[in-house]
Image (cartoon, helix red, strand yellow):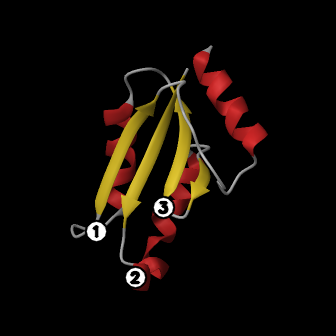
Amino acid sequence: MALYLVSYDIAQKDAFEYDGLWAKLKKLNAVRILYSEWIVSADPNESATIYDDIAPNIQAKDRLLVQEITNDATWDKLMISDDLFRKWLMKARG
């Protein structure tokens, strides 16, 4: 398995319009780690598939990035516990 970062820029004033985006991320078993950053576990080389699944839920003015995370990561004050994030990284490592 691989671990992917899903990052987006949306207008905070329009946040109420993104319930579909957040529902789709939850359906993918993604976990929110920062306000506009989620992690999701999937097979390697699946960033385009994840992107294609999520992209219809954002607006044309928004930005979206799906990127595989390497095992080399440093973080501070995520919205999930350090232990849980480490667990996701270890799971992705295989």
Q: Is residue 4 above or below residue 60?
A: above
How far apart in space, not on screen, are marks 3 and 1 (Cα)? 15 Å
| Residue that numbered label 1 is attached to | 59
Instruction: Give percent across and percent down for residue 77.
Output: 66, 56
| Quadrant for the N terminus in the image | top right
Q: Is residue 73 above or below residue 32?
A: above
Residue type at tag 1? Gln
Tell me the tag on residue 14. Answer: 2
Q: Would you identify the image quadrant in which residue 73 lies? A: top right
- Nearest to N terminus: mark 3 or mark 1: 3
Label 2: few (<14), some (14–19) or many (≥20) C-alpha neighbours in 10 Å: few
Q: Is residue 86 above or below residue 15?
A: above
In the image: residue 59, left or right of residue 87:
left
How far apart in space, not on screen, are marks 2 and 3 (Cα)? 13 Å
Furthest toward the left, the residue is: 60
Could you tell me which secondary element the residue under label 2 belongs to?
Answer: helix
* Near-viewer residue (78 or 57): 78
* Near-viewer residue (89 or 13): 89
Residue type at tag 2? Asp
Q: Residue at x 51, y 70 (%)?
A: 19
- Label count reads 3
Label 1: few (<14), some (14–19) or many (≥20) C-alpha neighbours in 10 Å: few
